[in-house]
Amino acid sequence: MKGVLRPAPGARLQEIELSEALGVSRSPVREALLRLVSDGLLLAVPNKGTYVKEFTCQDIDEIFDMRVMLESYSILRSQKSMTPERKQQLFDILEVMEKTHTEDNVEQYTRADEELHNAIVALGDNSLVNTTYARVRSMNQQFRVFSLADRTRFDDSLEEHRKIIHALVNGQIEEADRINRIHLELACQCIKDQLRKNGTA
């Protein structure tokens, strides 16, 4: 790969230009574009081309509505699937989050954040939910750093994750669901605030 491309929202993407910039043939570029359209990250406009999707505050609300539904479903089913191995996985993720928070490493923290919420959804033991969440996650991924742009939000996020994990491990399912809902609502609002601030909402 010759370089990292970061096309702006609304930009048109063309196979020839992308294949030349990335140093690959058009076939994998075409497949990648189709996949991104399927994931909701690009828009394919008939007879016009493929464009980078411009996300609005309504889009963010819809993404987080889906996250709340899918994660709540999984949390409420977690007692049946909470094995010692899964408890340890949650604690291991929390350890990484605490370490990266101390280091002010937002990028690594957001990766651990994603891993945690994937682990939470996996507790539902429902393959269809997992597949649906993966699509929602791909749309949400680009905004994760936005949700931690404020230092207070970064600090609060760690404490919320800590409480969610301890509630799950201790079988306090309703409490875990309550805190996770609040956590997602706050993250959603922070992202929308950042979009408005950047003039992209």
Image (cartoon, rainbow, N blue to C red):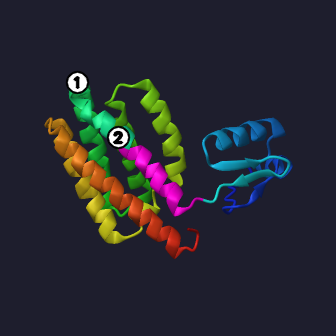
Q: Say which mark, if any, is on residue 71.
A: 2
| Marks 1 and 2, how far apart at CA | 15 Å
Q: Amino acid at mark 1?
A: Lys
Magenta-drawn stretch contains 66: yes
Q: Residue visible at 49% across and 51% down?
A: 140
The image shows residue 64, relative to residue 88, as above or below, that is below
Q: Amino acid at mark 2?
A: Glu
The secondary structure type at the circle numbered 2 is helix
Horizontal side, residue 111 vs residue 53: left or right: left
Check whether the beta carbons of the residues at disc 1 and disc 2 lie within 8 A of each other: no
The image shows residue 54, relative to residue 32, as above or below, that is below
The one nearer the camera, 129 or 14, is: 129
The secondary structure type at the circle numbered 1 is helix
Q: On the image, which quarter does residue 104 sit in?
A: bottom left
Horizontal side, residue 3 vs residue 14: left or right: left
How far from the left and from the top, in percent, is residue 141?
Answer: 50, 50
Q: Which SS does the magenta portion mostly show?
A: helix
Mark 1, residue position: 80
How far from the left and from the top, in percent, is residue 77?
Answer: 26, 30
The image shows residue 25, relative to residue 1, as above or below, that is above
In the rendered structure, which segment of residues is drawn in magenta?
55-68
The one nearer the camera, 100 or 71, is: 71
The one nearer the camera, 151 or 178, is: 178
The one nearer the camera, 171 or 108, is: 171
Q: On the image, which quarter does residue 183 sit in?
A: bottom left
Crowdedness of circle 1 by 10 Å Cα count: few (<14), some, many (20+)? few
